Amino acid sequence: MPTRLEEPGGMHLVNTFEEEFVEDTWCKLSKKVASDTSRIVVSLASFKEDRRFFCCTGVLIDCIESTSRILTSASLIRSSPDGNNIADNLEIKVYLRNKLVPGTLWNYNLEYNVAVIIVMGFRIMRTAEFHNQMQIEPQREVVAVGRVFESGKLMATTGIVTGKESKLDCNELMVTTCKITKAGIGGPLIDLDGNFLGMNFYGMKETNFLPRNIILTLMKRFEAERYVSYVYVILSYS
C-alpha cells in the first residue's frame, strides 16, 4: 500500500492542460479500436471560483440507468500536491458527447490517486471492460490514450510495458515507454485490441500506470463503503 500517489512535479499544472502528445498515433489504431475507444474516453476539468483548477482525462467504467461513472486521477480534486485532503467547493465539468456537462465526485482514494466522477442524465452504451482476467506482461505493446479538455481532441501514443519498477511510492504501479503529456493524466492504457489495462500517470521520461486489477479492487471497496453508509442512514432513521 503506498503512502500517497502523486503526479511528479506538483499538481497544479499551469499552462500545460492543453498540451497534445508529441507523437500522436491515433490514426494508427484500427477503425474498430479507435471507434470503441473514442466512446469511452472523456476529458474533465475542476474549477474553483471560476478559475480552472485541474484538467485531465477519464474513462467511462459503467452506466446504471442514466447515471454514468468515470474513472480518473484524484489530482482533479486534491487540495495540494502534498496534501491528504480534497479541495473544497470545486465545480467539475466533463466533456462528453461534444458538450460540457456537470460532474459530481462519487468516491476517491488519495493513496492511489484515484477518483470516480458521476454524470447524470446520460445513458452510455459502451464502457471500459476490465472485469475479465488478463495478464499484463513485459514487452507487451500498449497504447496510452488522452483527450484534450477544451478541444475534445483524442490522442494516442504507443509503447511497451517495461517490467521496470516505478520510481513513485507505489509498488503496484507498472511502467510503459509511452510518452504522454499532462493532458493524458487519468487516461486509459489499452492494448492493440482495445482492452483496458490500467490508468496512466504522467512522468517526464516514462509513463506509470495503475493496473486494472488494483482498480477493480478499489471499485469493490468503494461499493462496500457506499453500501455501509447507506445501511447506516437507513438504520439511523428506523
Image: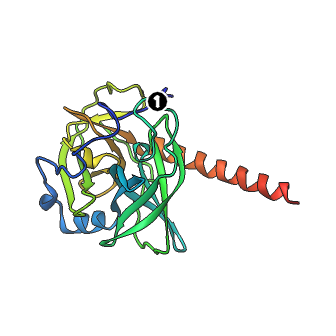
Question: Which residue extends farthest front?
Answer: 49
What residue appears at the point 50 percent right and 47 percent down from the top-left corner? 216
Q: Residue at x 25, y 34 (%)?
A: 203
Question: Residue beneath label 1, please?
Answer: 4
Query: Please, is residue 24 above or below residue 1 in the view?
Result: below
* View extreme (right): residue: 238
Q: Nearer the viewer, residue 190 or 133?
A: 190
- Numbered circles on residues, count: 1
Is 120 drawn above or below residue 232 in the view shown? below
Location of residue 194 in the rendering, given as x and y in whole percent from the top left corner: 29, 58
Please name the colour scheme applied to the rendered image.
Answer: rainbow
Name the residue rendered at 32%, 27% in the picture: 166
- At a point 33% along the width and 40% down the height, the residue shown is 12
Q: Is residue 28 above or below residue 76?
A: below
Examine the rendered structure and indicate whether residue 175 appears above or below residue 133.
above
Q: Classify 10 Å Cα crowding around label 1: few (below 14), some (14-19), many (20 and above).
A: some
**Element marked by disc 1:** loop
- Asked where in the image residue 124 lies, by quadrant, the reply is bottom left
Task: In this rendered view, identify the residue nearer to me: 128 or 107.
Answer: 107
Q: Position of residue 204 (x, y in %)?
A: 21, 33
Quadrant position of the C terminus in the picture: bottom right
**Which three-letter amino acid code belongs to the residue tagged 1?**
Arg
105 horizontally vs 183: left or right: right
Return the x and y of residue 200 as percentages of the image width and height: 32, 43
Q: Could you say where residue 71 lies in the image, as x and y percent from the top left?
A: 43, 53
